[in-house]
Image (tube, helix red, strand yellow):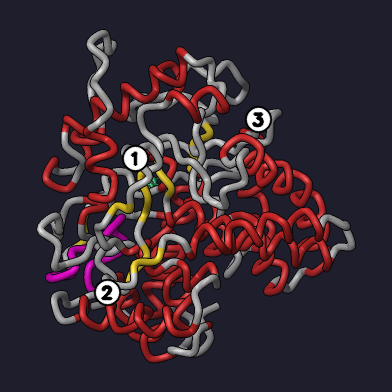
Amino acid sequence: MQTKESLKQEAQRILRANDRGGFTIPTAGLYPFQWLWDAGFTALGWMQFDERRAWEEFDRLFLGQWENGMLPHIVFHRPEPTYFPGPERWGVARTPPTSAITQPPVVATFVRWMLEQAQDQALAEAKARSLYPKILAYHRWFKRERDPANTGLITVLHPWETGADNSPAWDEALARVEVDPALPPYTRRDTAHVDPSQRPHQTEYDRFLTLLEVYKRAGFDQLGLLRECPFRVASLLIDCVLHRANRDLLWLSRRLGLGNEAEIEGWLKASQQGIESLWDEEAGLYFNRDLRTGEAIRVGVSASFLPLYAGTASPARAERLLRTLQDWAQQVRYLIPSTDPYSPRFEPQRYWRGPVWAVVNYLIALGFAEYGYPEMAERIRQDTLKLCEVTGFSEYFHPLTGQGLGGGAFSWTAAIYLAWGQAAGPVR
Ligand code: GLC
């Protein structure tokens, strides 16, 4: 086991090695472009040793923003043959090319934290001011094009938008997507980099790719897709991250004197109710919802704890969540497994069906700390740091053995180690 200091050096080295000149790839080979929520976490890591470089991560990310405000989940800054589906398959005619879906919108929150932490306040304020209108346009897009009926819940059109691609929460909703019989042939690249037992199944990939063809045929028209897309869910990852991001956008609006408070407060009121409608009293958890059937998706996943991060949960619900997680902790050595370890769908080494993800731990631990449960927050933090110390900066980890899984030298895991590893105490 290496010392904390040498691991910190190693984490910085990973970010530098994955730096492609202003944007950071998640890991070479497997993920060679800039991803939206990875960019956010990575910026928090850069912030610990190079503030200018941290802000640059967002400048590059927003080069991919669409005129309608949408911030895509991948920006293909330059061609790379090692990933599929790349820009040709997405068919988005833009420079730089991008995907056509989004991801958990962490940016507003992390911009706030970076502004609060910055040594160089002048730079931070200038950056926050220039990013603010772009983030506002992005959040307006969510509301206008993904919740036009003001239900308080965003409609998600692809499992990739949730960041938790093959979570068992999407099993039924995805199974209902009929594989396009005319699906153009393709070769997966992910299984050339990582053992297939740690990656999604082929049946899921065919449906992921079918959905891309659905968007292309619809000309990426969101309002049409809201009616016709065969996959439509409400995802705690999107709704809770967006709720907190709107709280932080509100804070930025006040702090920078920008005057959008009433509009943002209206969104918060709706999403507060929307998220709390996902609570399940019997399970002591929040569940995602299938928006085609209107039914709760009754599978516990790590995102089920995110209303603590959003700040929407009542103290009584927070207490239930604590007890549920304590119960999960009886089944695994390391928190937080991405799927309820009591569920028959729990697969401890397959991607989002069981493994521990450092970035999700970071958000949930913050939630527990803010609700007055510092012991649980610290337990999650220590588990996360120990996983990095014992097995390195892997993409995700086996919750029973601690084995590092998926891609290696992974940017967001290294970034979490830097942002969270400094000392015990406040989570951020
Ligand atoms: C995978 C993950 C997603 C992440 C991306 C890049 O697709 O599921 O959450 O953003 O890899 O690391």
Q: What is the quadrant of the N terminus in the image?
A: bottom left
Return the residue at label 2.
335
Camera-side residue: 121 or 183?
Answer: 183
Q: Main secondary structure of the magenta part?
A: loop
Q: Which residues are magenta?
A: 389-402
Dot 1 surroundings within 10 Å: few (below 14), some, or many (20 or more)? Answer: few
Q: Residue at x 53, y 82 (%)?
A: 370
Residue 60 shows in the view = no
Residue 298 screen position, x and y as percent: 26, 57
Residue 349 shows in the view = yes
Residue 218 against residue 243 in the figure, above or below: above
Return the residue at label 3.
66
Q: Secondary structure at mark 1?
A: loop
- Which mark is nearer the camera, 3 or 1? 1
CA separation in Å, label 3 and label 2: 37 Å
Camera-side residue: 275 or 179?
Answer: 275
Q: Amino acid at mark 1?
A: Thr
Q: Amino acid at mark 3?
A: Trp
Q: Amino acid at mark 2?
A: Leu
Residue 358 screen position, x and y as percent: 36, 65
Dot 2 surroundings within 10 Å: few (below 14), some, or many (20 or more)? Answer: many
Return the residue at label 1.
293
